[in-house]
């Protein structure tokens, strides 16, 4: 009888040990993915330009796809003078070269930058499954960190009453992780702007609110094209008093305005989201810093 009990406890101990090892293995794999995700976005940034775009565009770091200084451009004198076609001007705004980005992926339609955060990324939208860029990078390759993206419920021109952009809360600080910096009142006060760069114009949003919200799908839950619904929603968004993580700026936001909502998760809390919201205050034509001349 004693031997049977010993065998039983030995079996329980072995099974428990196996389960613990398996759980630790899963946890290690998860943490490895979290800390190493977003490698394809290394050195990404609209202010970092060092290398010339190669013909092997798909394998080129995205940071090299932003325009280079005019002084580095070299005219190709070997081009036949009788060529009938004229080179179309590149779509360059600031130092974001959309022409080169589109060679990689035509789903890239904007660039988002928030000063003093790591948010400095292309924005994508697919014609297919809205969740595609939840786990795919800007090259359409599987990547745990995914991309910054919008859904087809929003147009790509940011002319909707509320444009919602999604991004993961990565432990290594990438994607929308540093949105959580806005939980700090001092950081919130010192960093009021979100910039959206489009091929033809640049949008500036002033952040009016940052807070915890539930996990409802905003674009399915509210008809923002209905001004009464939008106005009622804004009453809460501009004064989210129920939130434990709320910072807000005294700005008059009405249903005649256009806002942007940046949405990310709260780590292991599946039923909540962290939202940073801004109101459009400036819509300026593209600032082209480098425009190639047409060749005869």
Image (spheres, grey):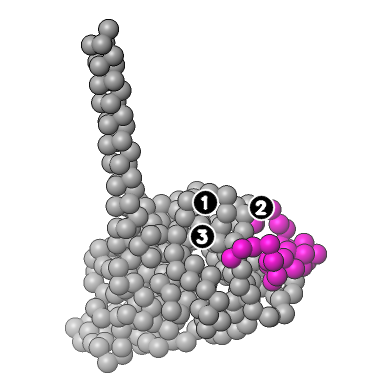
Asked whether residue 294 appears in the rendered view, the answer is: no
Sequence-first tag of 3 and 2: 2
**Which corner quadrant of the image does residue 172 belong to?**
bottom left
The answer to whether the residues at label 3 and label 2 have Cβ atoms under 8 Å apart is: no
Q: Residues within 10 Å of mark 2 (few under 14, many from 20)?
A: few
Q: Position of residue 48 (x, y in %)?
A: 32, 80
Which residue is farthest bottom?
71
Distance from label 1 to label 2 (Cα)? 21 Å
Q: Which of 215/18 is in front? A: 18
Q: Position of residue 65 (x, y in %)?
A: 32, 74
Q: Please, what secondary structure does the residue beneath circle 3 have? A: strand
**295 inside magenta stretch:** no
Q: Which residue is mark 1?
A: 269
Distance from label 3 to label 1 (Cα)? 11 Å
Picture layout, residue 3 above or below residue 128: above
The disc at residue 217 is: none
Picture layout, residue 192 above or below residue 220: below
Q: Which residues are magenta?
A: 218-245
Q: Residue at x 30, y 72 (%)?
A: 43
Left or right relative to 97: residue 209 = right
The disc at residue 220 is: 2
Q: Residue at x 21, y 87 (%)?
A: 77
């Amino acid at each position: 009888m004693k031997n049977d009990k010993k065998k039983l406890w030995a079996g329980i101990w072995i099974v428990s040990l196996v389960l613990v090892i398996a759980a630790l293995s899963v946890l290690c794999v998860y943490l490895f993915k979290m800390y190493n995700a977003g490698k394809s976005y290394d050195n990404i940034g609209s202010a970092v330009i060092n290398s010339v775009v190669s013909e092997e565009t798909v394998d080129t770091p995205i940071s090299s796809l932003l325009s280079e200084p005019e002084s580095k451009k070299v005219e190709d004198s070997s081009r036949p003078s009788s060529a009938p076609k004229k080179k179309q001007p590149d779509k360059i705004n600031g130092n974001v070269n959309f022409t080169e980005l589109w060679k990689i992926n035509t789903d890239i339609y904007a660039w988002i930058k928030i000063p003093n955060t790591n948010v400095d990324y292309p924005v994508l939208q697919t014609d297919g499954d809205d969740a595609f860029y939840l786990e795919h990078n800007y090259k359409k390759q599987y990547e745990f960190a995914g991309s910054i993206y919008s859904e087809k419920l929003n147009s790509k021109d940011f002319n909707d009453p509320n444009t919602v952009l999604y991004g993961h809360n990565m432990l290594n600080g990438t994607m929308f992780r540093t949105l959580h910096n806005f939980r700090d009142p001092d950081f919130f006060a010192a960093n009021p702007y979100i910039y959206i760069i489009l091929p033809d114009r640049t949008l500036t949003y002033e952040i009016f609110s940052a807070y915890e919200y539930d996990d409802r799908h905003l674009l399915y839950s509210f008809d923002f094209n209905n001004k009464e619904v939008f106005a009622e929603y804004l009453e809460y968004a501009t004064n989210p008093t129920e939130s434990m993580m709320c910072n807000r700026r005294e700005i008059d936001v009405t249903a005649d305005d256009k806002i942007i909502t940046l949405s990310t998760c709260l780590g292991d809390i599946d039923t909540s989201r962290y939202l940073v919201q801004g109101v459009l205050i400036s819509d300026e034509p593209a600032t082209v810093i480098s425009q190639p001349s047409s060749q005869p």
